[in-house]
Amino acid sequence: MDLTATEVLKAIRARQLKPLDVLDATFRQIEKLNPTLNAVITLASQSARDQAEVIEQRLARGEPMPPLAGLPILIKDNQRTKGLRTTLGSALHLNDVPLEDAGIVARLRHAGAIIIGKTNIPEYSIGANTVNPVFGATGNPYNPELTCGGSSGGSAVAVASKMVTLATGSDHGGSLRIPASFCGVVGVRCTPGTVPNEERRTPSTHYSLQGPLARNVTDAGLMLSVIADRTHGGERDPMAFPLDASRFAKLDDIDPSSLKVAVTADLGGLLVSNETRGLFRSRVNAMAAWFKRCDWHDIDLTDAPDVDWHLRQDVFVTQYFEQAGTWPEDFNPNVMATYRAAEKTSMTAIAKARHRQLLLIRKCQTLFQDYDLLITPGVSVQPFPWTLAYPKQIDGRPVENYMAWLHLTSALTVTGHPVVSLPAGLDSNGLPFGIQLVGPMYQDHKLLSMAKAVEQMGSSSERFKQPQ
């Protein structure tokens, strides 16, 4: 379906589209494309039809409808769905059927969204290439032999290929932003605590965040207005600070010529390919005239990858200490490598990393005293074959492990600033190129409004136009 989420909902409310017709079109698109792309690994066809019929009956009676009533949505397979299997992309959980929804799913259901199925992920959602031993690989919608990124790869592909208009994702070191960049869609990583996640295993962290994948910023904001609500589980998350989530449904109109923008290709010297640098510079050249100021900036976040590695170890032990002894030998090597490294890391090293994290946060806060936005490339490389867990080298420089090519996103996880991953046209191979728009902490609504302004300017630029 070519319509956006906002357009579908408007047509349903105006009785120009029936929820069942929207659902049928959704399932036809999945049936047509999923055998090639492998984005959707579980469907809830009957329960979805039952829900659509109830919504049609309520519409016929003229009842007031919740904000997402009748809109089909897919759920990332690390988020629990009542009565619908949640496998974590692992044979260990292949037949797990939760008795209740995760909070993010419960809030979507309460808003009238029709949960139609689950999307593919790497095992336990750890890895930036969506491949697992149970369901196999999810292909890039622009070239199925290439990676779609991860870990929210199935969701990004489903949105990019117009199976659905919205899907859920989650983000550790880039799991929303990387597939958004590789697939030409919008991904939003909010300030930690904006979207409640009552399933976190630690009271405060920049990891285990949840967010939307959409075709445009307005739709992403609409989904945030629901999943950032403090009800249906959200009240159980100690990180969920007071917030009026409904504001995200209406973004401000911002004149981009009023914005002061800092740009950097590598955040001070992180590993970024020459191809990506060239693509980013061409986008900056196209954007520069849109803004009041557009300055190349030398902000240095090169300490962030090592900080991330230490903080990630801490998070993994908190998350998995009860099950680490039960993992089979062929379990996700990314998870095991991080967990085993944590067993050898001292508390002193973790504590020092937390202090270094504070210094990096302050460095970004200083930048936002002078600028409204920081813009970087979305990923350090363009999509590569999904048969590779990660690129083995970038321009002759070896990539040491599964995180070493993700520093443009993981560095911003460390600082905790909100990020919108925005499509920025195609490369010479016809593959999407994405950029990250970074804003001040706790100013997520303003960041989305600024991203909408950039998106609108880009729609009239051939170099920057969103992939179709």
Image (cartoon, helix red, strand yellow):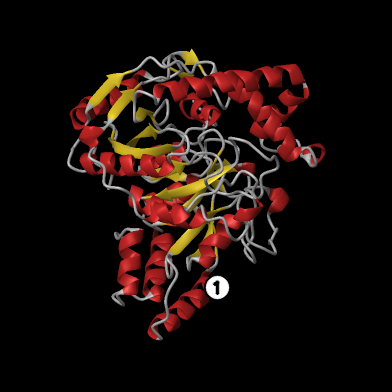
* Residue 389 on image: x %, y %: 55, 31
In this rendering, the answer to whether 100 lies above or below 431 is below
Report which residue position mark 1 lands on: 47
Residue 180: tell me if it is visible: yes
Nearest the eye: 58 or 37: 58
**361 relative to 90 in the view: left or right:** left
Nearest the eye: 158 or 430: 158
* Residue 60 on image: x %, y %: 39, 84
Disc 1 secondary structure class: helix
Nearest the eye: 163 or 99: 99
Nearest the eye: 56 or 274: 56
Q: How many numbered marks appear?
A: 1
Residue 147: tell me if it is visible: no
- Residue at (66% x, 37% y) in the render: 332
**93 relative to 226 in the view: left or right:** right
**122 relative to 335 in the view: left or right:** left
* Residue 392 on image: x %, y %: 51, 22
- Residue at (48% x, 80% y) in the render: 54
Quadrant into which the N terminus falls: bottom left
Farthest residue to the bottom: give it. 61
Instruction: Check disc 1: other Cα within 10 Å, few if <14, some if 14-19, many if 20+.
Output: some
Q: Label 1 sits on what residue type? A: Ser
**263 relative to 129 in the view: left or right:** left
* Residue 425 on image: x %, y %: 27, 37
